[in-house]
Image (spheres, helix red, strand yellow):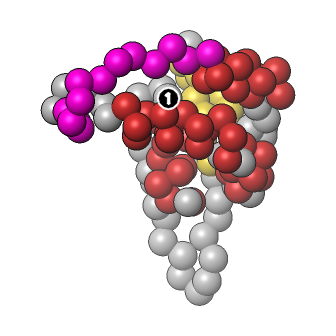
Amino acid sequence: MTEIQPFAVQIPQSVLDDLSDRLACTRWPDEVAGAGWDYGSNLDYMRELCDYWQNRFDWRAQEMAINQFAHFHTEIDGIDIHFIHERGKGENPMPVMLLHGWPSSFLQMQKIFLF
């Protein structure tokens, strides 16, 4: 039988510090004057986005929000599986399964439904 282990999302501070350092060291390219989004991402937008991730995004608040759910981890046929199991509430709760097939999409799905 496969062993199921509870866990919590805990991003090490060293990872967040490294991300902040790498964002601070971004070498920004030149941009064609007035190009907007015609030749790729708009430079002003990308600078604002990087500043947001580096200085204003509250990583710990997001961890707390994500960890409000019961997270579990197991391995099935050599594949690591991360899942949340929450029982329904109310008189007649309906089971719901949210599935995805891309390894990094789990937290993105949570962001859609939580935030």
> Quick one: which residue is furthest to the left in this view?
38
Q: Percent from the top left, x then y, of residue 101?
A: 39, 31
Q: Percent from the top left, x then y, of residue 108?
A: 49, 42
Image quadrant assignment for residue 10 = top right
Q: Percent from the top left, x then y, of residue 59?
A: 72, 43
Q: Main secondary structure of the magenta part?
A: loop
Q: Nearer the viewer, residue 61 or 109?
A: 61
Image quadrant assignment for residue 54 = top right
Is residue 63 something one can see in this rendering?
Answer: no
Where does label 1 land, which residue? 104
Residue drawn at x 55%, y 17% is 26
Q: Amino acid at mark 1?
A: Ser
The span shown in magenta is 25-37
Is residue 88 something one can see in this rendering?
Answer: yes
Q: Nearer the viewer, residue 26 or 20?
A: 26
Q: Is residue 49 magenta?
A: no
Q: Percent from the top left, x then y, of residue 47?
A: 48, 34
Q: Nearer the viewer, residue 20 or 2?
A: 20
> Quick one: which residue is furthest to the right in this view?
13
